[in-house]
Amino acid sequence: MYFNSKNEGCVTMQKIIKHLEDNNMTYFQHMLFAFWLARIMLVLSFKSLAHAILPCLFITDVSDAVSDLKILFQEMHDNSV
């Protein structure tokens, strides 16, 4: 489930263009969004590790952020259809 790979074959320009069009983004918009998302996930990873060691820290931060990201992706999907 977590590693469901839909990346069949090598990367082609057609696949890149289709992905960008499907998500209604330019290359640079997509790149900035991916960097922003990676930064959020990195911060959440550290919060999760801190919570694992000291459960009184960041009690709902990660689950709240995951819920927010789910809503964001659903809205993005709804707007691209």
Image: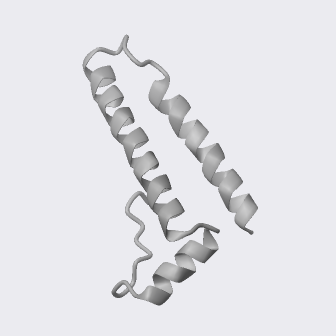
Residue 7, image x and y in percent? 40, 78
- Residue 51 image-quadrant placement: top left
Q: Tell me if 34 is positioned left or right of 71 in this view.
A: left
Which residue is pictured at 42% across the width and 39% down the height?
Answer: 40
Residue 31, image x and y in percent? 44, 61
The single residue placed furthest to the front in the displayed view is: 28
The single residue placed furthest to the left in the displayed view is: 53
Whether 25 is drawn above or below 45: the answer is below
Q: Choose between 34 and 50: the one closer to the eye.
A: 34
Residue 11, image x and y in percent? 37, 83
Q: Choose between 51 and 25: the one closer to the eye.
A: 25
Placement of the N terminus among the 4 image quadrants: bottom left
Whether 40 is drawn above or below 18: the answer is above
The image's colouring method is one colour
Q: Tell me if 56 is positioned left or right of 80 in this view.
A: left
Q: Choose between 67 and 33: the one closer to the eye.
A: 33
Which residue is pictured at 39% across the width and 84% down the height?
Answer: 8
Whether 14 is drawn above or below 60: the answer is below
How many numbered marks are there? 0
- Residue 41 image-quadrant placement: top left
Placement of the C terminus among the 4 image quadrants: bottom right
Which residue is pictured at 35% across the width and 27% down the height?
Answer: 47
The single residue placed furthest to the top in the displayed view is: 56
